[in-house]
Amino acid sequence: MNNKQAIKPDLFVNNFTFPKDQEALEKGASEDERSLYSLSRTVGWKILSEYIEEILTRLDDVNTQAIEKGASFEEIGKNTIIINQTKGIIEQIKNKVKDAVSACEEENGQ
């Protein structure tokens, strides 16, 4: 390899696994579950999870601020529907990773 050549991302990603990955594979965890399990063990996921929680908290504050500014019941109602739908979608993302972790760890007897 030439010293000026960039490292190909797929080389890194394909070799980035955790010891439990092979066990999870043998127990029937899907590739997606194993990948999300690996992701959940990174500092990046921890940072992202904390940011997601911050966003959820800020969404909860939207109606409080609207009420303080004298918003109408109709506006507060619309906000509530949109906030709850948004929070539901965000929770689905978090749950996808949590479910993958559960699938990999349970299949490994943990």
Image (tube, rainbow, N blue to C red):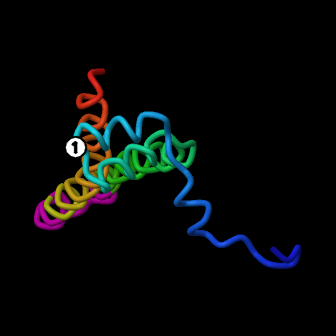
Left or right of 45 on screen, residue 4: right
Left or right of 54 on screen, residue 94: left
Please say if 5 is above or below 88: below
Residue 10 falls in image quadrant: bottom right
Q: For the magenta stretch, what is the residue range? A: 66-80
Q: Is residue 71 magenta?
A: yes
Q: Is residue 87 magenta?
A: no
The residue at the point 28 percent across, 40 percent down is 26
Q: Nearer the viewer, residue 36 or 29?
A: 29
Residue 62: x percent and y percent?
32, 56
Query: Which kind of residue does numbered mark 1 sit on?
Result: Gly
Residue 92: x percent and y percent?
23, 53
Q: Main secondary structure of the magenta part?
A: helix
Q: Residues within 10 Å of mark 1 (few under 14, many from 20)?
A: some
Q: Nearer the viewer, residue 74 or 29?
A: 29
Find numbered disc 1 in the image and state the secondary structure of the residue it sits on. loop
- Split into 4 quadrants, where in the image is the N terminus? bottom right
Which residue is label 1 attached to? 28
The residue at the point 65 percent across, 72 percent down is 8
Residue 90: x percent and y percent?
29, 55
The residue at the point 17 percent across, 67 percent down is 75
Left or right of 39 on screen, residue 78: left
Residue 4 falls in image quadrant: bottom right
Please say if 3 is above or below 50: below
The residue at the point 14 percent across, 66 percent down is 78
- Split into 4 quadrants, where in the image is the C terminus? top left
